[in-house]
């Protein structure tokens, strides 16, 4: 069952559209219409973000195809991405 | 595409037919409330300002007052002042007359001989005005007469996923039909202003978009504060919004995809058609107040967490993309766009449904906020009272 979505093909985070428990499979449709599946590493509340792939500390976190901040620590694929591991960055 | 509205002598078209009891200052606000309670068909609001303000703050207050009176949803206005406030009756009346030629009456509490005499005078003026207003009939007008203000409040990630993009679809439809759509909330452009600025129709407008953001940030820095404090709010974060950049990227979806034809200062009269920006705070009631003062007859308001907010002058249509919030606060929210997230409907389908709701509302259907009697407003401020 599809339980998550990505907004832009450049994004490295997606959004879960149902509540996810640690160990659940996160399924989402990619830009090429193929379904991708990854394992949830944390509990993730509905509409919160998860990492599509590993994001190293300091690398940009990308949603809507744009930078929304940078990874404050190394983030693993399937982890909950939120204020505990992302820092706001003023780029302008 | 047409709607049924009230033609005004200044050439504009209202979707409501209220008489406004306008308090010129905080010192006249309770009196205005008591007057309005006596007159069915009148509206009022609590004006917290109007006195002991530095000139830029007084200008914000004056523009909101004049703009409210000139809003085409208002048939006519009874201005109530105390008498000694900085926003003197003559100044308020002149500011209203600079924007409109609609019916206008004035009552000064100190000159009338106190509360009871002032209330009696004002109630008589207002009752007469409401009776005159009741003779107005709705006529058919082109949708291009509409100015729709867009706002988001209590945002969560569904705002950026569904509600704001659907409002963006609506905005594009309105612009293509020759109407006006206002994008507001300067603090929620931060981190996305470079994307927005690219859509300015001219280089000057591009620069204005960047300038209002920088001006806002600098104004807060003057008192040693950062705009990021308190933004995203605790509710935004609980919902899943992590940074201000993320909130802003979601927020600007409300502006759709068309070129930006003008940038207006807070509460100034909107006279350009198409997509325009108004420089307002992220604080919802003060941003909505500015767009209503700018002439917006209808406000479209997205929410993730759910909010009851309304406005005394212009109907506020509330939309959520969060299915849980809709179930939880259906009493307050007019339109559920969560089917976009779950693949049940497309963005453009829901944009068209929203346009139908806007037209129904223009034709007279009450929004949920109207039926519940919500009419809170706030006026933006630059600094403390003097």
Image (spheres, rainbow, N blue to C red):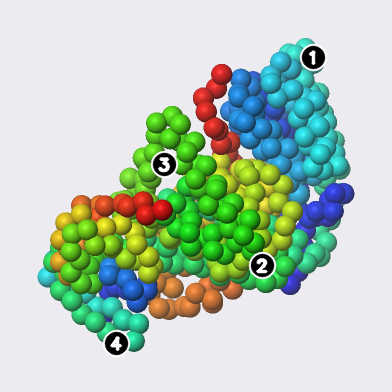
Could you say where residue B115 lies in the image, as x and y percent from the top left? 71, 17
What residue did someone put label 2 on?
A: B175
Horizontal side of B90 relative to B175 (left or right) equals: right
Residue B178 visible, this angle:
yes
Q: Nearer the viewer, mark 1 or mark 3?
A: 3
Could you say where residue B5 lies in the image, as x and y percent from the top left? 77, 58
- Tell me, yes or no, whether the two marked residues, 1 and 4, touch with CB atoms within 8 Å: no
Is disc 2 on the same chain as disc 3?
A: yes
Q: Is residue B231 above or below residue B301?
A: above
Kindly identify the residue that appears in the image at 36 percent across and 51 percent down. Answer: A90
Q: Identify the element where label 4 is drawn.
A: loop
Q: Is residue A34 above or below residue B379?
A: below
Is disc 2 on the same chain as disc 4?
A: no
Kindly identify the residue that appears in the image at 39 percent across and 38 percent down. Answer: B226
The part of the image, by quadrant, that contains residue B93 is: top right
Q: Nearer the viewer, mark 1 or mark 4?
A: 4
Kindly report the distance in space between the C-alpha atoms of the residues bearing marks 1 and 4: 76 Å
Q: Is residue B279 above or below residue B51?
A: below
Is disc 3 on the same chain as disc 4?
A: no
Kindly identify the residue that appears in the image at 51 percent across and 68 percent down. Answer: B166
């Amino acid at each position: 069952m599809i339980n998550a979505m990505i907004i832009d093909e450049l994004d490295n985070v997606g959004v879960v559209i149902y509540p996810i428990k640690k160990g659940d499979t996160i399924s989402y449709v990619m830009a090429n219409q193929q379904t991708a599946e990854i394992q949830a590493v944390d509990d993730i509340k509905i509409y919160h973000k998860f990492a599509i792939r590993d994001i190293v500390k300091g690398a940009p976190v990308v949603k809507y195809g744009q930078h929304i901040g940078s990874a404050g620590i190394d983030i693993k694929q399937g982890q909950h991405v939120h204020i505990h591991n992302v820092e706001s960055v003023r780029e302008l | 595409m047409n709607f049924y509205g009230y033609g005004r002598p200044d050439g504009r078209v209202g979707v409501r037919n209220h008489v406004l009891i306008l308090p010129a200052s905080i010192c006249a606000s309770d009196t205005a409330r008591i007057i309005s309670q006596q007159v069915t068909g009148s509206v009022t609001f609590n004006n917290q300002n109007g006195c002991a303000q530095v000139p830029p703050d007084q200008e914000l207050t004056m523009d909101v007052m004049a703009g409210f009176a000139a809003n085409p949803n208002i048939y006519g206005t009874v201005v109530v002042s105390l008498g000694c406030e900085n926003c003197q009756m003559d100044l308020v009346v002149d500011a209203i007359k600079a924007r409109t030629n609609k019916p206008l009456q004035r009552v000064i509490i100190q000159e009338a001989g106190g509360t009871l005499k002032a209330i009696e005078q004002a109630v008589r003026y207002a009752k007469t005005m409401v009776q005159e207003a009741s003779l107005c009939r709705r006529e058919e007008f082109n949708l291009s007469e509409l100015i729709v203000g867009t706002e988001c409040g209590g945002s969560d990630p569904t705002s950026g996923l569904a509600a704001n993009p659907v409002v963006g679809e609506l905005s594009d439809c309105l612009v293509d039909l020759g109407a006006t759509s206002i994008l507001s909330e300067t603090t929620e452009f931060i981190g996305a202003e470079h994307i927005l600025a690219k859509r300015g129709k001219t280089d000057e407008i591009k620069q204005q978009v960047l300038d209002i953001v920088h001006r806002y940030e600098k104004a807060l820095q003057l008192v040693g504060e950062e705009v990021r404090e308190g933004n995203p709010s605790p509710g935004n974060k609980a919902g899943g919004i992590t940074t201000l950049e993320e909130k802003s990227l979601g927020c600007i979806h409300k502006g759709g995809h068309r070129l930006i034809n003008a940038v207006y200062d807070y509460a100034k009269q909107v006279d350009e058609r198409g997509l325009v920006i108004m420089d307002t705070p992220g604080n919802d009631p003060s941003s909505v107040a500015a767009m209503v003062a700018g002439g917006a007859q209808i406000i479209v308001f997205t929410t993730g967490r759910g909010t009851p907010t309304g406005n005394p002058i212009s109907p506020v249509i509330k939309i959520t993309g969060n299915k849980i919030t809709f179930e939880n606060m259906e009493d307050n929210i007019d339109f559920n766009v969560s089917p976009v997230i779950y693949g049940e409907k497309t963005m453009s389908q829901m944009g068209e449904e929203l346009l139908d709701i806007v037209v129904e509302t223009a034709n007279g259907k009450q929004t949920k906020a109207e039926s519940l009697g919500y009419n809170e407003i706030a006026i933006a401020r630059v600094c403390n009272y003097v």
